[in-house]
Structures are given as structure tokens and as C-alpha cells.
Amino acid sequence: MTTTPAPLRAPLVVEFPFTRSLGPVQAAFLTGLRERTVLGVRTEGDQVLVPPVEYDPVTAAELRELVEVEPTGTVTTWAWNPEPRPGQPLDTPFAWALVRLDGADTALLHALDAPGPEHVRTGMRVRIRWAAERTGAITDIACFEAHDDEGAAGSVPAPRAHDGRFDEPVTGIVAAARLDYTYSPGRAQTAYLHALAERRTVGERCPSCAKVYVPPRGACPTCGVATTEPVEVGPRGTVTTFCIVNIKAKNLDIEVPYVYAHIALDGAGLALHGRIGGIPYDQVRMGLRVEPVWSEDGRYPDHYRPTGEPDADYDTYKELL
């Protein structure tokens, strides 16, 4: 009696924090949050947009007229979040809400702190809860909270002109884009990973065009038919194209500069990615013949090194560029 192996599962994090500079409108908006001031921008059609933008979404005209709006507002729509994820505004269940601040014509998306969904409704009045420590970011608004001023919604002050000037203005931010999830490979990639654990590289051949895909995808993207025939390729291959990396990646223990290349393994119908080692970065070239150097646990190629063979002729790999 054979038993079916348990499906492979592994946590996967895709993260790319990047630094961006701010224009005059966004700089004023974020600096204002640091100072407990909410700024919007007035459009040619006399609408006040919060958060502000630098160009009119209707006319594309440049916008520079800043106005201050109230820290109170009205929920226009909402959705309950019963299981907050790491990095979200609150670590207890809360509502994501669109809040139209008093004096604004558009809504701001943020967290609304409430004991449960039965305490949230469209039209409820809320106010900003400011963060104790503010740095000039949207997180300076810790969240919204219920505000008992039902009779004040129709008599709020008009937006007030603001010059957008603050001491020590914020001129740039680091935006952290992050996606973390549990990945479970399908049939084709599971077989590929099991073969790597045996220091073998196995792809699958398309029954129509005969191209061998490595890593296998379970189907041919060109012909649209399933691929089931396993084909062992390599272990040696040819560098088709490459780039020299000069910026050190966070949490990656590799000294720069180093070379990252497309490598066409012998017998494969397309190239895969791999790092080139064992040779000075400025001696890597197209056509260089390489072989894998396996990781310490032997589960995958850590990098590829020159085999010492003569370079491959361009015609043998030109279709794999």
C-alpha cells in the first residue's frame, strides 16, 4: 500500500521597501499629520480632496491650493477585519472604514477602532485618534474612533486656507511593500523540488512543441496543453545573458559586486536564473559553461561556477536569450 506524501507548504515573504521623494502637496500633507493638522487640496471644481493629490483628477491641472479640514468626520462605508495581520494599524479586530472628514469632499481610508461590527455603521460620526509619537506618515493617524457629536455634522466650519508651511518639513518617505503568505506548489513544481533534494534538475516536455520547461509549470504557456513527461536536464549549462549587481540586498550575505545570470541547462528549452561564482565578476561572459555548486544542505544550487570547458557557440543558445 502506497501513501501519498503530504503537500509541500512553506511561508513566503515578498518585501520591497523603497524610498520616494515628496512633492510640495504630499510633503505638506504628511508634515501636517505630524503636527496634528489635516490638509486637503482644492480643485478647479471647488472640491476639497483628502488625501490631497497634485493634479486635478478631472482636468489634470496642477493643484496647489491647500486647505485645513477638521479631524472629525463621517463613515461612508466600512468592512470588519476580524483577524488583523502583522503591520496593520491595530492588533485587535477593527473596521476598515472610508471616512469623509468634515470639510472634505472625498473619503480617507483608515482603521476604525470599535468593540465589534455591531458598533459600526455607515453614517456614524468619528474622530482621529493621533499616534503618541508622530514622524510625518499616514500612521500618525493611529486610527479613527467613535465621536458623539451627531448634531454637529451639518454645521462644521468651512475648510480654512493653509500655506502648507511647517518647521522641518518631511521631504521623503520609505514605503514598505510587503506580502507574506503560505505557498503550496502544484504537482509539477512539487516533483521539481523533490528532484532538487536529490541534486537532480527535472523539467517537463510539452507533447506539442517539445520544449522542455525548467522549472516545470504543469502546462505549456505557448501551446496550452498539459506537460507530464519528466525530463532530467543539466547539470551543466551555458550563460546566455547576465547582469552585474552592485547594490547589496537586505539580509543577503553576498558581497557585491556579483553576477546574476540566465543559465540554459543542457537539454532545457528555456533559461533559469542563477548566481555565478568562482570567477571574477568582470570575467563572466555570454557562452560561459557552468555547473552547479549545491547548498550546504544539498537542497538547491547555491550558485554556478565555470566548468573549464570552451565557451559555447552563440548559435547553440541564441534562441534561449
Image: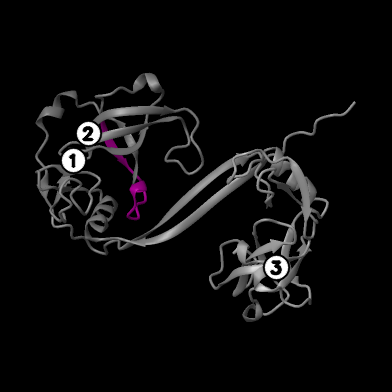
Q: Are marks 1 and 2 in contact (CB under 8 Å)?
A: yes
Describe the element under mark 2 as helix, strand or loop.
strand
Q: Residues within 10 Å of mark 3 (few under 14, many from 20)?
A: many
Q: Position of residue 280 (x, y in %)?
A: 67, 80
Quadrant of the drawing holding the C terminus: bottom right
Q: Quadrant of residue 118?
A: top left
**Amino acid at the residue labelled 1:** Glu
Q: CA distance from mark 3 to mark 2?
A: 62 Å
Describe the element under mark 1 as helix, strand or loop.
loop
Q: Nearer the viewer, mark 3 or mark 1?
A: 3
**Amino acid at the residue labelled 2:** Gly
Identify which residue is drawn at 45% across, 41% down: 88
Q: Residues within 10 Å of mark 2 (few under 14, many from 20)?
A: many
The image's colouring method is one colour
**Amino acid at the residue labelled 3:** Thr
The mark nearer the N terminus, 3 or 1, is 1
Q: Nearer the viewer, residue 107 or 306?
A: 306
Label 1 sits on residue: 70
Q: Nearer the viewer, mark 3 or mark 2?
A: 3
Q: Position of residue 55 (x, y in %)?
A: 20, 53
Quadrant of the drawing holding the N terminus: top right
Q: Position of residue 290 (x, y in %)?
A: 74, 69
Instruction: Write down the region rendered in magenta.
Output: 126-140
Label 2 sits on residue: 73
| 158 vs 285: above or below | above
**Numbered disc total:** 3
Q: Does the magenta segment cover residue 129? A: yes
Q: Does the magenta segment cover residue 276? A: no
| 69 vs 114: above or below | below
Q: Which mark is residue 267?
A: none
Label 3 sits on residue: 238
Q: Nearer the viewer, residue 197 or 141?
A: 197
